[in-house]
């Protein structure tokens, strides 16, 4: 499936999934934005938060459903296959399906999800916070340009760029730069990261984990015996 078709499918899914207010309207007041980690802590757990993002792990058993709640603009990374019904505040509903490893940008809005599948479902949701400051100048080589064999842009808008990263066993990149990012690991990670000062650091993480990485340069190498795959959510800053 080429990139254009993938983007068109993602846009269509986002329209069905978001149940959001029209772009010209302001977000509802805080009292009308139920936090899922508060109103449905059994399915939603905050695992990381700073001034840029909140990362929420979402887990449902077969047939389980939530209550109406709100998310800001977010990127969902699906760790399992999904067959979900989303009910909107107006009572309408839609069914969507996702495969493990897919991702989706979800505009801010309210919804009530229900797992229509016969298996548990799990995803990592990267909730975006209001960006401040000015857009940063390029701080180093773009990996999707200098190493297109390992890095591919799969989605981009003014708030985020989502990059899929794939390495075979023993493969390495070249020195490149990422802005502040959240990495969601679809496979186990056994990698060495070379730094601009010549130092190196090994990182070992399990499939399904995530990590916030401050902006900077590095040169990764897959030191594992298996291919590795990562969905990287790169955070942008708005222009002043």
Image (tube, rainbow, N blue to C red):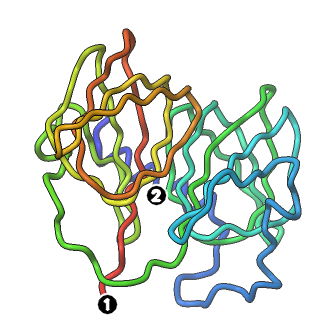
Front residue of this view, candidates 26 and 14? 26
Residue 48 in the figure: left or right of residue 70:
left
Q: Residues within 10 Å of mark 1 (few under 14, many from 20)?
A: few
Which residue is at a point 62% across and 64% down the rendered structure image?
18
In the image, residue 50 lies at what x, y percent? 57, 66
Which residue is the site of mark 2? 11
Disc 2 residue crowd, few under 14, some 14–19, many 20+, Cα 10 Å: some
C-alpha distance separating marks 1 and 2: 27 Å
Query: How far across and down, in percent of the image, does residue 141 sit?
Result: 13, 52
Kindly report which numbered mark, 1 or 2, lies closer to the viewer in this rendering: 1
Secondary structure beneath dot 2 equals helix
Question: Please, is residue 39 above or below residue 64 in the view?
Answer: below
Q: Which quadrant would the C terminus be assigned to in this image?
A: bottom left
Q: Position of residue 145 (x, y in %)?
A: 13, 47
Q: Which circle's residue, 1 or 2, is located before the other in the chain?
A: 2
Please report the residue visible at 40 percent of the width from the left and 63 percent of the height from the top: 235
Looking at the image, the residue that sits furthest to the top is: 225
Secondary element at image label 1: loop
Q: Residue at x 56, y 62 (%)?
A: 74
Determine the residue positioned at 54% across, 67% down. Answer: 128
The quadrant in which the N terminus is found is top left
Residue 82, placed above or below residue 222: below
Q: Position of residue 133 (x, y in %)?
A: 36, 84
Report the residue marked by disc 1: 240
In the rendered picture of this protein, how many numbered marks are placed on residues? 2
């Amino acid at each position: 499936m080429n990139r254009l078709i993938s983007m068109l499918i993602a846009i269509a899914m986002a329209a069905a999934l978001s149940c959001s207010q029209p772009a010209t309207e302001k977000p509802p007041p805080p009292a009308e934005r139920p936090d899922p980690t508060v109103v449905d802590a059994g399915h939603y757990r905050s695992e990381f938060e700073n001034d840029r993002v909140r990362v929420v792990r979402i887990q449902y058993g077969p047939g389980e459903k939530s209550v109406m709640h709100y998310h800001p603009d977010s990127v969902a990374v699906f760790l399992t296959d999904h067959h979900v019904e989303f009910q909107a505040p107006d009572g309408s509903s839609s069914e969507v399906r996702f495969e493990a490893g897919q991702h989706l940008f979800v505009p801010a809005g309210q919804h009530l999800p229900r797992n229509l599948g016969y298996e548990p479902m799990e995803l990592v949701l990267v909730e975006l916070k209001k960006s401040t400051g000015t857009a940063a100048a390029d701080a180093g080589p773009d990996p999707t340009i200098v190493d297109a064999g390992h890095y591919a842009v799969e989605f981009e808008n003014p708030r985020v760029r989502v990059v899929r990263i794939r390495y075979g066993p023993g493969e390495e990149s070249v020195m490149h730069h990422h802005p502040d990012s959240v990495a969601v690991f679809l496979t186990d990670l056994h990698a060495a990261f070379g730094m601009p000062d010549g130092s190196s650091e090994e990182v070992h993480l399990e499939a399904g984990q995530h990590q916030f990485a401050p902006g900077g340069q590095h040169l990764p190498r897959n030191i594992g015996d298996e291919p590795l795959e990562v969905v990287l959510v790169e955070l942008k800053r708005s222009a002043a």
